[in-house]
Amino acid sequence: SQTIHQWPATLVQPVGSPLSLECTVEGTSNPNLYWYRQAAGRGLQLLFYSVGIGQISSEVPQNLSASRPQDRQFILSSKKLLLSDSGFYLCASRGASGTYEQYFGPGTRLTVT
Amino acid sequence: AQSVSQHNHHVILSEAASLELGCNYSYGGTVNLFWYVQYPGQHLQLLLKYFSGDPLVKGIKGFEAEFIKSKFSFNLRKPSVQWSDTAEYFCAVILYNQGGKLIFGQGTELSVKP
């Protein structure tokens, strides 16, 4: 089965600073990858998804961007953080072999101060 | 637009009580549905899924869910909850024509009193 790694686990950053969250996947190849943000009482909101290297789809307009430099690496970035970027960020992977459930990483708790 | 709605935001039960968490979806195409669970301090993990066939699906830890197409529902049930079922539960629908992304409901927090 797949294993999703995310780091850092927690991050406290000042407003206006840059952001880079990393996600890597083990146990599969050519996965579809996803970034979600989880907010209390609002479920999980899909931010970006990628079906391959260099292919990024953005779901909501925001201050964040995503990149996929390698097959099993997915990065969430920002040039200048806003207070509203605080939240819990989850990376997920879906294998391309036909299994449709997504596997989730442990998440990163981001606090923008 | 496609959406998933979970009606119960916070449910509090005593051990041995029966559980039913509501989930309704809004999607006109073929649906595949999931329930995910997030135990305190743990990863989000798959509880059960419906793809086709028997609309009553069984998952891990004694959970089951029934897909009722006419009601656009996929409610989660467990006949007798345990303290260890305390967690947040999410219903989701997959959109195949959009990279297989999942649309999640708002989540239901379940607290089971020992």
Image (tube, coloured by chain):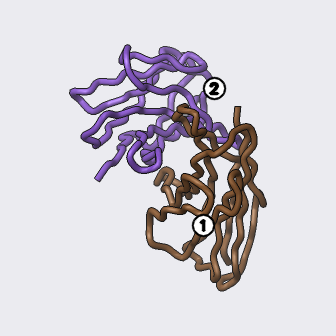
* Residue B63, position as x, y percentages in the image: 52, 20
Taking the spot 59% from the left edge, 20% from the top edge, the residue there is B60
Image quadrant assignment for residue B7? top left
Q: Which residue is mark 1?
A: A66
Q: Residue at x 55, y 61 (%)?
A: A55
Residue extending farthest to the left is B70
Q: Amino acid at mark 2?
A: Trp
Chain bearing mark 1: A
Which chain does the residue under circle 2 lie in?
Answer: B
Question: Who is closer to the viewer here, B78 or B43?
Answer: B43
Residue at the image point whose x is 36% and y is 44% from the top:
B4
In this structure image, what is the colour of chain A? brown
Q: Residue at x 58, y 54 (%)?
A: A52
Mark 2 residue crowding within 10 angstroms, few (<14) / some (14–19) / many (20+): some
Of the residues shown, which amino acid type is indicated by label 1?
A: Ala
Colour chosen for chain B: purple
Q: Is residue A40 left or right of residue A89?
A: left
